[in-house]
Each structure stands twice: as C-alpha cells, then as structure tokens.
C-alpha cells in the first residue's frame, strides 16, 4: 500500500478518535472511550508504519542513538525505548487535552515531559533530557499546579456534572480537530518525503565545526593563542567530549548574542510578572464579579455559592 | 531502500514531535480553561523540543540541543507571565473561562 | 555677483516672498502686526533699488539679457521651464513701474490701513502680489509667466476679499477669480499651441523664431531660436498653420480677462470692494496691465496672424468707449475711476494693437502714475468722510482738504490729457497717432478698423476728460456740503492716534504727510513722466526690437513725412478735445453749476443716463445669459448626481457593508475563535505549500 495513503488514513482515523474523546459536558459512555482508544491506537500504529516505510535520509541515527561509536548497530533496546516513550507521550498528550479536570491535565502533562525526556535520552541528548525533567517537571509544572489549586474549585465528588461548565465542554471540537490533523498530515507528508526531492538539510557535525570554525578562532588571533598557551586545557577533541561539554561549547561559542537576548527576555518576564502581580483589582469589581453568577461560571459548588466575598471563595478553594 | 519496522529514523521522532505539537494546538482551541490552554502551549513546545533533538542527531551536531535551552527559556518566561495574568484575570471575574473575556467583539 | 549684475534681478521676487512669509507670521502675533508695513515696504524698496541698479546694464546691453536660471524647475520631455529672468527694456519699464508704484502705495497703505484687524494679512497678500507680479514681468518662459499670472490672480482674490466679513467683498473676490479663470484657460491654450509649434516656451527661443518666420529669413539666429525656427517650419509645412493662428487668440483671451476688456471686464468694477490702496496698486496700476505686457512681449506672434491685432483693436476700442460711457453716469467716486480704468486699459490695447508696443506701454506707465494717484486721493476722501463716496452728497471740500484737492486735480488733468504738461496727454496722443499711422499704412478692411478705432479713441478722450472733471468739480467746488458715511472704514479707528479723544472723525480732514507724501510723488510723476518720456522718445528706444514693423514706423528723426504729419496733427486735435471737454464739465458741474446733488445730464436725458448708470445692464445680461443657465445646468447635474450617481455609489457602498456584516461574527472577541482561525490558516498554508512542492518536485 502506498505509504502516503497510509499516512492520510492514519490522520483521518486519529482525527476521528480524538473527536470521539473530546469532552461533551457529561461522562463518556465506556464503549465510546473504548472505540476511540482502539481507533487511536490503530492510527498511531499506522503512523509509525508509514514513518518506518519512508526512510528519511542517509544519516544513520543508530550512531547517535547508541551514544557511542558511529558504527555500532541499532540495539533492540533503543528501538523499544522509542516506541515506549513515544506511545506514552502521545497518549498522555491526548489525556491532557481531553481530561475535564485541570489538575489531572497537569499531571498528565508531567507524563508528557517525562516521556519526552526519555526520547531525548534515546537521542543522546542526556543533558537536555535532565534539564527538561528538572525545569519543566520540577519548576514550571509545579507552578501550574499551584495556580490550578489556587484558582479552581475542586468538586467534592468525582462527578463530571459538578465541574465548572468551561471545563466540561470543549469548544469547536470538529473544526479544531480538522485543522490540527490537516496540519499534521501536511507536515508529515513533507517530513516523510524523499530527501532527494528537496535536498537534505545540510548541517555541520561537531567534528567539522571544531576542525574548521573553532580551529580558525583558536589560530587566527594572537590573543587566543596566548591564552591557549597559558591555560592548561588540552586542545579540544570532539570524540572525547561529553554531551554537556559539547553543548556548552556550542552554546557559548556559537550563540553568544542569543544568550544575551535570552537573558533580557527573562529579565523582562521577571519585571512583567512583578508588575502584574502588584496590580490591584478595585474592590467593587472583585465584589461584583463574585456576586454575579453569570460571570462566575465556577460557582456551582455550594461552598462557592456560600461565599460571595472573593477572599472566602479563594479560601474555600484551598481546602 | 526499504527499512524494517525495527529500525529508527528521523521520521519517527518527527512523527512524535508533530503529533505532540498538533495535539497541543487542538487543546489550545478546544479547552476553555485558561490554565489548561497555557498548558497546551507548553505541550506544543514539547513537540518542538523532540523535533529539535532529533534534528541535532540527524546532523550529528548539538545545535538543535542548544536551541532547546532557548525554548526552555521562553517557556519559563511565558509561564511566569501567563500565570500571573491568569491570576489577575481570575481576581477580576472569579472564573477561568477564557470566554468571559470576549470584550473585544466587533 | 555685483549689485549691477542683471542676474540679481532673479532675486527681486524672492525678497517679497520672504516678506510675505514674515508678514504671514506676524498675523499670528497681533502685537507685532504694526511692523508688517515696514517689512513689506522695505522688501518692495529693495526690489526697486535692484531694478534701478541693473537698469543701466540691461538697457546698455542692447538686446534682451537672459542669464542662467536662478534655479531649475521643470525640465521634462523637451519642455524646459526654469526659474530664469528675461530682461530687456520692456521688462525694465514694467519692473520699475511695479516696484516703484508698489512702494508708494505700500507707504500710503501703512497709514490708510492702520487699525484694520487684518493689518499684517493685508501686507502679506500685497507681498504675494509683488512676488507674483515681478515674476510675470521677468519670467523667461511662458510657464513661469503663467505661474506668476496665477499668483497675481490669487493675490487679487485675497485682497478684494480682504474684508471677508462683508458679503459684497466676498462676492466680488469670487467674481474676479472666476472670470479670470476663463482668461487663464485661454493663456493655457495659447501656451500649448506655442509649445506645439516651436517646441519651446522660452522667449529666447520662440520670439526670435517668430520674428524670423515673419521675415522668412531664418539665418542669424542663435542655436535655441534656430531649433525653434526649424521645428516651426516643419510644423507649418505639416499643416500646423492653424496652431500658429490660434496661439495669439489664446493669449489674447487671457490678456482680456486679466486686463478687464470686453467681454470679461465685469469683475474689475466690483473689485473696488477691496481696500482703496489695493484698487490703486493692483486694479489700476499694475496687475490689470499684465495683459498689455503679455501682448507686447509676444508681439511677433500677433504679427504672424493677420486677424489677431485688428481683433484686439476692435475689442479694445469697444471697451474704451463703453467703459468711459458708463463712468460718465456713475455717482460712486471709486466706480467712476474703476470704469475709467477699464476704458484706459482699452487705450493701452489700442496702442499695442496698432503695432506700437511703445504707445501701449507708454500709456501704461503714465496711467500707472495718474490712476494710482486718483484712486489714492479717492481713498483719502473716503477715509476723511467715513466711507462716503457718493458725489451727490459731497461738495466743496477744497477748503477742508486742500492737498487732496490739488493732487486729485493733477490726476484728473493727467487722465483728461490736458495739453503739454500732463503725462496722459503725451501717451494718449501717441496711442491715437499710431492708430491713425496704422490705418494709413494698411488698406481695405484693416484700415477701416483702425480708422474707426482711432475715431472712437478721440471720442473716448472727450468723454474721459468730461467725466473726470465732473467728479473733481463736484467734489471740491461749490458750497461746502457733505454727509458722513456710515461705513466705519478699517482706518476709522486709526484716527484715535491723530485726534486723541475725538474717537471717529466727525469732520473731513486732511491726511497726514505719511500718506500724502507718496501721493505727491505720484503727482509729480503724472506731470513730468509725460515730458520726460514723451518728446524724448525714451520709451521707444527702450522697447526697440519687440516688433519689426513698428521699428519701421518709429516716430523719431527717421520718421516718414506723413507719419510726422499725423503726429503733429494729433498734438493739436487731442489738446483741443481735452480742453473742450473740461469746459463742458465746467459749465455743467463747475463752481457756478445750477443743479446740486444731481446730474444735469440725467435731467435732460434720463433714459440714456439711466442706462449708463445701470452699466448698460451688462451684469444683468450676463446673469441671464450665462450665470442663470449655468445655475440651471448645475441644478440638473445636482439632481442627476443625487438621484443616479449617489444611488450607484451608495449601492456599491452597501457591498462592503454587507461583507463586513457577514464577517463581523468572526471578530467575536473570543480567544478560541482567533486560535481556531489561526490554526486553520496555518494548516491551509502548509497544506497548499506541500501540494505545490509535490507538484513542482
């Protein structure tokens, strides 16, 4: 069968599965979830199949995946890693967008981050894998959890009808799914297509970079030579470098301006966050908001209805 | 050259990255809870991260991985600002519904 | 560049341009507005001094001086119109008259306009006028001339409508502007014809070429003129004769519009709604003479067409007698002089039509002196009597205003052409004499035309002398009697300076010498300019060369015998006519007149007098024949526009509105709508791109 066709079919079925799983404001019947799960898994398998059939490029990823020498064969473990982590990531992602409770969405997102980190490890990007885990899973997601806890009202029972209306029902599920999967099909069609049609993306390996660009830098200026002589560091050799060393080298040698810009962005974000946090909401606005049932879509719970005052509402949510 | 199912290529990782990205996008559109919407944008970042790392491996250098650092930077900045805004808006309307802020209607 | 280098002439307009800007700025600061007159007067004075400084060099050069242009302006597709000056005797005379009279009038106006709320604005507009007028007389090409031509029109509009709160002034300003548009259209057409034939609009190019066409000898021309001559002969051989014939008629229409000749003269009498100094400067001495200048300047073109100059002569003769007749029966002091201006402009055109730019320009110069003088003295009377201009209500002012009495007498004598001493005598005499010269020199219908025009000119001279002395006698002789006007003229408040607590003057009074000074200069000019320029033939020597045939007719030592005889005869005839007319005026209106507060002619011939007093109903006829049909047409167009065009346009306008209503829901303000739209867009773009790539690959 034509691989392209397989890809399109996989997209269509994936779209149907996702559409079936979209929250509808009430609990999904079991058969519906099951059907959707089956279609979805089938679509994912078909996608994998087409990805495998359409071999992309002549560079053997196995060398990178093995993390060792270039000529090492592809271990079964590495392949298994990929399928496991990829499957976990995609399934978790589906749950993130279909779960009606924000807290669970966030927890599923943690699973996505963990699986992504696993994929990064299988791509011999150990440093970034752990950085992702620590920064995303550790810092950012905790912040999200904190905000969710702060702002949403946990329903006393795990009944979907008790949850806020805006969490129960999704907007524009059909159009969103159509747009998403058209985009996916188009992206994958490009990504899976033969490289000869467009020419391969040409990148430089680290070895080449060190031999050409870095070597030039080291030799060209006398100052660099002097430093080189003074320092006890031996000449750089790509094969002996660890992942984090190579990363650091590339980061600071190759993208100094980008680092500065990133620093500026972080500073701006810091100041912005402080300003936003210090913005005072006029008392009457907060009170009106709390008193108006239309605006406060969340106030279906008895606790929230009991307390029109915003501090009490907030207080009740924390319990 | 045909490959068997047991081999791994860039296409596999690209598939995973693209699916994560698209799922994030769909989630951003369909969910109405502002926090979940921002969560979905973070998931789009995850898709980009996977693709970048795969591209780095494909080319045999670490530039792709370097860019993940910048993605992380932006994600962190975005999270700080977005969550600050969400809190501010919540204080005004007592709701996380993004639809409650449709005041720009034409 | 020394002060005597002709090239410096190009800066004369710009000095006034700076003055216009400065005066314009002074409008914003009323407390400094009083300096505007000084600024304007010094700018004009600088221009006058420059004109005098270069006079010797220009006149001494013998031919026209055309230095490198001051700046480049238009150079495109063979059309070359730069900001350059073309200086010869004619230009220098015009320049001297414009800047000289302007300087005197500005000094007079400094006093006259005192207390006017638009004091700085007035002098700003006057500066604009000087800028444009000097550009007109110095331009070295027709396009630049047209720029100045439009500029003087603008200044005229601004100054007629100076008291814009009065509806009459606004209407008069509009009328002047609109009537002039017709003439301007003619100038444009003439310019196009000239460019078509000669391929250039530069005087340096097409004037010698036209002269060469006249003689049929294209040799001895400079390169520019030779090129124009070559193109002209090619165009003429190619059936372009009608272009060459049409060109002078186009210019003629423009000249008639600007110089208030039939049928476009109706705006000039109304233009007297402007302040009196404006009437004196623009609508008597300078701007209205620019039509005469243009014809004198492009004389070779007019000579090329056998019908052009006779047409000018007929129109000018008709205008002269018509203007004079209407002036005969007016009671309003300024209106008398306004129609007199129309009539005298006719004289100038008769002069140029008789192939004698000399006579036309000579009369232009003397007219500039005495008509400015008359208007300014009329302004003094008006000033003194709080706007009273009705000569039925004024009488015997000679004791109250002795200086004005003498000055206006001199002006009237010059206008009447009293023999020997006055400028008007010499110039009018030359005009009439050359007209008869021309009649003798030609034959057939053309000769008849010139004879007729000459006779009409003599008749007009009689009427002119009569009506101006009628005014003078009525105003200054007889028992002392006057009614103050109700019109507190802009200068009214200015009397506070002179009279302390009196407030507005309740008595006629003499002007101070700041205002009378310039009048004395003008009076001296009115008298001695004639003696200086007339018998000495200075003007003729200056205007040498504008017309080949006129040179042959020149009234000098080398004049042919019959020409000499005509001129000698004319000295006596016109002197007799003037004296006779003054005597008639003395009998009817002099100190021993029988009828007070009315006109004896009206009592004798009420119908004729009434018709003339109503200006022969020309305004009414125009109103019925032109304005009313245009108005009706406008109404029809309005209905068509409102019913048909508007419907179509509004109908088209509905489309975007409906479209907008259809699309408006997309701008729901909902975040999800925008997100979805963006996602769909991205998906579509990527899909299309992929499709295109796979097709292309």
Image (cartoon, helix red, strand yellow):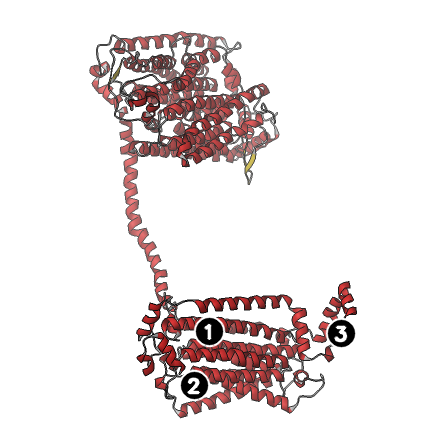
Question: Which residue bears the numbered disc 2?
Answer: A21
**Protein chain holding label 2:** A
In this rendering, the label closer to the viewer, 2 or 1: 1
Query: Tag 2: Cα neighbours inside 10 Å, few (<14), some, or many (≥20)?
Result: many
Looking at the picture, does residue C206 appear above or below residue A312? above
- Residue C433 visible to the viewer: no
- Of residues C425 and C311, which is closer to you in this image? C425
Residue found farthest to the right = A229
- Of residues C638 and C497, which is closer to you in this image? C497
Marks 2 and 3, how far apart at CA: 57 Å
- Residue C522 visible to the viewer: yes
Residue B67 location (% of width, % of height): 60, 73
Left or right: C250 as drawn, with respect to C75: left
Disc marking residue C694? none
Question: Which residue bears the numbered disc 1?
Answer: B83
Residue A318 location (% of width, % of height): 40, 81
**Protein chain holding label 3:** A
Residue C342 location (% of width, % of height): 36, 23
Left or right: C394 as drawn, with respect to C688: left
Q: Residue at x 51, y 77 (%)?
A: B42
Query: Tag 3: Cα neighbours inside 10 Å, few (<14), some, or many (≥20)?
Result: few
Looking at the picture, does residue C344 appear above or below residue A99? above
Disc marking residue A233? 3
């Amino acid at each position: 069968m034509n691989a392209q066709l397989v890809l399109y079919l996989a997209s269509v079925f994936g779209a149907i599965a996702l559409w079936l799983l979209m929250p509808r404001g009430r609990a999904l019947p079991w058969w519906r979830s099951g059907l959707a799960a089956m279609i979805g898994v089938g679509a994912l398998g078909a996608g994998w199949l087409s990805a495998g059939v359409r071999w992309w490029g002549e560079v053997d990823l196995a060398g990178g995946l093995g993390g060792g020498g270039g000529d090492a064969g592809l271990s079964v473990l590495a392949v298994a890693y990929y399928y496991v982590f990829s499957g976990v990531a995609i399934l978790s992602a589906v749950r993130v967008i279909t779960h009606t409770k924000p807290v669970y969405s966030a927890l599923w997102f943690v699973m996505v981050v963990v699986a992504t980190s696993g994929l990064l490890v299988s791509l011999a990007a150990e440093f970034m894998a752990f950085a992702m885990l620590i920064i995303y899973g550790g810092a950012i997601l905790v912040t999200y959890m904190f905000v969710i806890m702060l702002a949403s009202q946990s329903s006393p029972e795990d009944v979907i009808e008790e949850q806020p209306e805006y969490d129960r029902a999704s907007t524009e599920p059909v159009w969103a799914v159509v747009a998403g999967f058209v985009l996916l099909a188009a992206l994958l069609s490009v990504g899976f297509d033969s490289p000869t049609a467009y020419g391969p993306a040409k990148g430089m390996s680290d070895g080449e970079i060190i031999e050409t660009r870095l070597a030039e830098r080291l030799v060209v200026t006398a100052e660099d030579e002097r430093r080189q002589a003074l320092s006890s560091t031996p000449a750089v050799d790509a094969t002996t470098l660890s992942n984090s060393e190579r990363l650091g080298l590339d980061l600071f040698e190759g993208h100094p301006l980008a680092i500065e810009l990133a620093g500026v962005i972080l500073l701006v974000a810091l100041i912005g966050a402080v300003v936003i946090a210090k913005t005072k909401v006029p008392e009457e606005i907060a009170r009106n908001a709390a008193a108006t049932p239309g605006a406060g879509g969340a106030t279906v719970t008895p606790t929230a209805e009991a307390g029109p005052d915003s501090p009490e509402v907030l207080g009740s949510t924390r319990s | 050259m045909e490959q068997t199912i047991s081999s791994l290529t860039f296409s596999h990782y690209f598939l995973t990255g693209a699916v994560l990205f698209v799922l994030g996008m769909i989630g951003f559109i369909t969910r109405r809870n502002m926090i979940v919407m921002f969560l979905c944008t973070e998931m789009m970042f995850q898709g980009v991260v996977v693709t970048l790392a795969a591209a780095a491996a494909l080319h045999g250098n670490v530039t792709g991985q370097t860019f993940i650092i910048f993605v992380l930077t932006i994600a962190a900045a975005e999270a700080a600002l977005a969550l600050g805004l969400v809190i501010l808006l919540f204080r005004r309307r007592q709701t996380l519904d993004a639809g409650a802020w449709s005041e720009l209607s034409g | 560049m020394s002060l005597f280098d002709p090239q410096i002439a190009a800066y004369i307009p710009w000095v006034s341009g700076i003055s216009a800007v400065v005066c314009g700025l002074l409008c914003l600061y009323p407390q400094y507005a009083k300096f505007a007159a000084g600024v304007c007067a010094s700018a004009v004075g600088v221009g006058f001094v420059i004109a005098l400084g270069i006079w010797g060099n220009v006149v001494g050069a013998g031919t026209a001086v055309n230095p490198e242009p001051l700046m480049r302006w238009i150079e495109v597709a063979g059309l070359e119109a730069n900001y350059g000056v073309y200086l010869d005797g004619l230009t220098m005379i015009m320049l001297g008259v414009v800047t000289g009279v302007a300087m005197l009038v500005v000094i007079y106006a400094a006093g006259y306009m005192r207390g006017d709320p638009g004091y700085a604005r007035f002098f700003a507009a006057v500066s604009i006028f000087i800028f444009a007028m000097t550009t007109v007389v110095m331009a070295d090409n027709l396009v630049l001339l047209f720029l100045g031509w439009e500029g003087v029109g603008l200044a005229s509009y601004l100054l007629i409508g100076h008291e814009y709160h009065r509806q009459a002034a606004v209407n008069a300003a509009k009328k002047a502007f609109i009537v002039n548009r017709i003439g301007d259209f003619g100038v444009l057409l003439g310019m196009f014809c000239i460019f078509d034939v000669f391929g250039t609009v530069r005087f340096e190019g097409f004037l010698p070429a036209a002269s060469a066409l006249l003689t049929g000898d294209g040799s001895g021309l400079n390169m520019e003129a030779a090129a124009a001559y070559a193109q002209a002969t090619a165009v003429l051989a190619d059936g372009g004769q009608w272009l060459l014939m049409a060109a002078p008629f186009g210019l003629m229409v423009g000249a008639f519009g600007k110089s208030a000749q039939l049928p476009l003269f109706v705006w000039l009498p109304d233009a007297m709604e402007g302040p009196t100094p404006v009437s004196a400067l623009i609508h008597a001495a300078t701007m209205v003479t620019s039509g005469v200048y243009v014809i004198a300047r492009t004389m070779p073109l007019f000579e090329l067409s056998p019908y052009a100059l006779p047409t000018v002569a007929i129109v000018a003769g008709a205008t002269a007698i018509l203007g004079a007749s209407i002036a005969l029966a007016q009671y309003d002091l300024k209106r008398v002089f306004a129609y007199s201006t129309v009539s005298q402009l006719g004289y100038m055109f008769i002069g140029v039509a008789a192939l004698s730019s000399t006579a036309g320009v000579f009369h232009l110069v003397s007219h500039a002196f005495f008509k400015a003088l008359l208007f300014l003295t009329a302004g003094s009377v008006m000033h003194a009597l709080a706007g009273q201009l009705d000569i039925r209500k004024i009488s015997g002012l000679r004791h109250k205003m002795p200086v004005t009495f003498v000055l206006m007498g001199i002006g009237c004598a010059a206008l009447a052409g009293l023999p020997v001493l006055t400028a008007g005598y010499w110039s009018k005499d030359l005009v009439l004499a050359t007209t008869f010269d021309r009649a003798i020199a030609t034959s057939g219908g053309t000769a008849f035309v010139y004879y007729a025009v000459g006779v009409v000119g003599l008749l007009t001279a009689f009427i002119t002398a009569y009506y101006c002395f009628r005014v003078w006698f009525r105003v200054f002789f007889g028992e002392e009697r006057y009614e103050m006007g109700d019109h507190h003229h802009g200068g009214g408040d200015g009397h506070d300076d002179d009279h302390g607590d009196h407030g507005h003057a309740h008595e006629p009074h003499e002007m101070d010498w700041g205002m009378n000074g310039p009048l004395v200069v003008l009076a001296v000019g009115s008298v001695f300019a004639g003696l200086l320029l007339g018998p000495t033939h200075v003007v003729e020597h200056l205007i040498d060369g504008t017309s080949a045939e006129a040179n042959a007719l020149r009234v000098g030592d080398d004049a042919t015998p019959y020409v000499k005889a005509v001129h000698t005869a004319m000295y006596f005839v016109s002197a007799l006519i003037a004296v006779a007319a003054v005597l008639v005026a003395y009998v009817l209106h002099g100190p021993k007149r029988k009828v007070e507060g009315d006109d004896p002619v009206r009592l004798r011939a009420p119908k004729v007098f009434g018709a003339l007093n109503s200006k022969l109903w020309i305004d009414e006829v125009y109103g019925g024949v032109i304005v009313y049909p245009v108005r009706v047409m406008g109404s029809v167009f309005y209905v068509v526009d409102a019913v048909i065009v508007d419907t179509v346009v509004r109908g088209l306008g509905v489309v975007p509105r409906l479209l907008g209503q259809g699309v408006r829901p997309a701008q729901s303000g909902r975040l999800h709508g925008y997100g979805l739209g963006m996602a769909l867009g991205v998906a579509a773009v990527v899909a299309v791109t992929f499709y295109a790539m796979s097709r292309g690959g």
